Amino acid sequence: MHSNFNFKLCKRFHQMTHLEQSHSKVPKIIHQIFLNASDDSVEFFRKYTSHRESWQQKNPDFKYILWNEEKIQKLINKSYPTIMPLYRSYKDKWIARSDIARYIVVHFMGGVYADIDLQCTNSLTSLYAELGDKSVALNYSYTPFGIANDFFLASKNHEFMAHVIDGLPEADVLYFTPYLNTMFRTGPMYMLGRYLNYIHQEDIYFLQDSRLYTSGKIGDNSWHGHGLDGYFITVVYTGVDSLQLISVILLIIFIVRLNKLFRVRKSLVRKSKSNVRIFDRRSVSLPILEEEAL
């Protein structure tokens, strides 16, 4: 899984920050994101108008923000400039860009993030009451595995969201199919990896059911939405034991990581050889050293 390579904090500062954040409250803000303005995406956006409106209708005392591409880029440029090269590298990969954007807006302002195809069925007030002194809530239920990133909430500048954002560059490793790329670089399996490497897991609240919202996808299947590889994974998942499928996926990850290490090693060896000077004994006369008497 993705390790804590870039998350460097002084231990004392880390403990003080964690103590302060563990008692912070999640602001009453609902974030939704729509980045791709292509014809197909606009139609998708319109199809779920009632779903988006449900969040405002069920939570009239919450501030609602719909983020577009222009707003996201301005925010990243101003407050997260080190992430901008990675964000731009996902050109035309709108799912990956949306994943990055949702982590950033929740870290920057705090509040709730929900996909635009999710329908709110109950007020979020009850969830806020359930959180107690916890300031992050995640949804572990994702088919077939991972922590779903279509709905989550956190307080402003929370340490866990910083941990999620911090790991994005290290997770930028190519896998074998577009769907696995999304899953492990920015999506649910990436979120699972960041959670497993988070040192204060006890502070995170996991939703037990979906009574606060329902996916309500109209004729959609998220596995199919990524092309042939998504369809293939759907067939495999429905016909093969989940544990076997997870084992295969983890084996693929191991092979990819191992291949990356071999490439790095090969590059280092090549550089070291280029700096070695060949010594020719015939061209140099060395003085004869006599052994000293004992």
Image (tube, rainbow, N blue to C red):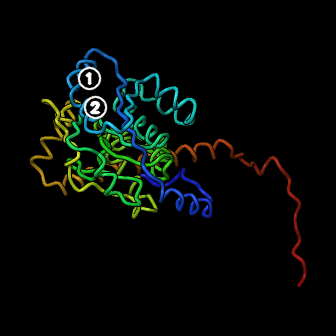
Q: How many callouts does the rendering have?
A: 2
Q: Residue furthest front?
A: 61
Circle 2 residue: 116
Query: Residue 161: percent from the left, percent from the top?
Result: 45, 48
Q: Label 2's element?
A: loop
The N terminus appears in which quarter of the rendering?
bottom left
Query: Pointer 1 and pointer 2: residues touching (CB < 8 Å)?
Result: yes
169 left or right of 242?
A: right
Among the 4 quarters of the image, the one containing residue 178: top left
Q: Give how far apart the Cα atoms at labels 1 and 2 are.
A: 7 Å
With 39 as the anchor, is 90 left or right in this view?
A: right
Identify the disc placed on residue 231.
none
On the image, the x and y values in percent for residue 208 come to 23, 56
Instruction: Count residues near mark 1 (Cα–Cα under 10 Å), then give few for <14, some for 14-19, many for 20+.
Output: some
Q: Residue 159, relative to residue 178: is it above or below?
A: below
Residue that carries the numbered disc 1 in the rendered image: 45
**Quadrant of the image occupied by residue 223:** top left
